[in-house]
């Protein structure tokens, strides 16, 4: 009988992560979440909501990198310890991770322009100014296209001058818009 209990204990210890993992990561948080819903306090709601957000992220990471995680023999124990730290309210692990790592990413996202490719700087290249831009446009589109742009700009300038004069007559000489 002693050897049977010893074997049972060995099996329990060898498979502790498999047995304790679902209890720590699912059963207790589900129970505590239901209890939190039934109370009027928002603090426990926040604790368990942040836990479920982090648990979802951990599961996504685990599913995404499953082939790499297979090579870590202690992954299941690391996950169990991390989950215990997140679950136990005494440590406030879920709140800490959420406030320091998750929230800054989602609340204040920094846009990263991955499509920007800077032009190679050539030491013999002239700086782009109005004259070189006009020369490039004439070379690419011809002088007639450039004349059309100039005439459109002249027409819009005349229109804006007329518009400004109508404001002067309506509101007085010192009116600025």
Image: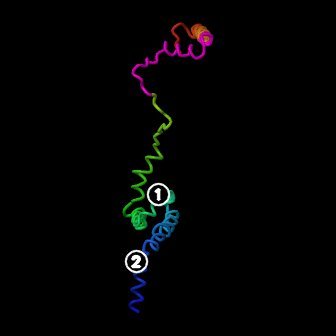
Asked whether residue 142 is drawn in magenta, I would say yes
Number of other residues with Cα within 10 Å of mark 1, as a class: few under 14, some 14 to 19, many 20 or more: some
Name above or below for residue 98 compared with residue 90: above
Residue at 47% from the left image edge and 45% from the top image edge: 107
Q: Looking at the rendering, in which quadrant would you find the N terminus?
A: bottom left
Residue on which disc 1 sits:
54
Horizontal and vertical percent for residue 103?
A: 44, 49
Q: Report the front residue among 75 and 118.
A: 118
Task: Kindly state the secondary structure of the residue where label 1 is placed.
Answer: helix
Q: Which residue is mark 2?
A: 13
Q: Nearer the viewer, residue 8 or 86?
A: 8
Q: What residue is at 42 percent from the left and 89 percent from the top?
A: 4
- Magenta stretch? 120-148
Q: Earlier in the sequence, mark 2 or mark 1?
A: 2
Query: Which of these two is toward me, 30 or 63?
Result: 63
Q: Is residue 138 left or right of residue 44?
A: right
The magenta stretch spans residue 163: no
Is residue 91 rendered to the left or right of residue 51?
A: left
Judge depth for marks 2 and 1 and give the one in front.
2
The secondary structure that dominates the magenta segment is helix
Q: Is residue 41 at all visible to an observer of this figure?
A: no
Please state the horizontal and vertical placement of residue 104, each as a whole percent of the image: 43, 46
In the rendered image of this protein, does residue 115 appear above or below residue 126?
below
């Amino acid at each position: 009988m002693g050897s049977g209990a010893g074997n049972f204990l060995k099996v329990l210890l060898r498979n502790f992560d498999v047995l304790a993992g679902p209890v720590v990561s699912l059963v207790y948080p589900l129970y505590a979440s239901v209890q939190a819903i039934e109370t009027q306090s928002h603090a426990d709601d926040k604790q368990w909501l942040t836990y479920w957000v982090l648990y979802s992220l951990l599961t996504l990471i685990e599913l995404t990198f499953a082939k790499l995680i297979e090579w870590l023999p202690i992954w299941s124990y690391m996950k169990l310890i991390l989950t215990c730290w997140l679950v136990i309210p005494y440590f406030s692990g879920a709140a800490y991770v959420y406030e320091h790592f998750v929230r800054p990413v989602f609340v204040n996202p920094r846009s990263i322009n991955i499509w920007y490719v800077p032009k190679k700087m050539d030491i013999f290249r002239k700086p782009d100014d109005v004259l070189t831009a006009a020369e490039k446009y004439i070379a690419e589109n011809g002088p007639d296209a450039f004349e059309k742009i100039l005439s459109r700009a002249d027409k819009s300038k005349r229109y804006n001058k007329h518009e400004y004069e109508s404001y002067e007559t309506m509101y007085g000489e010192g009116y600025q818009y």
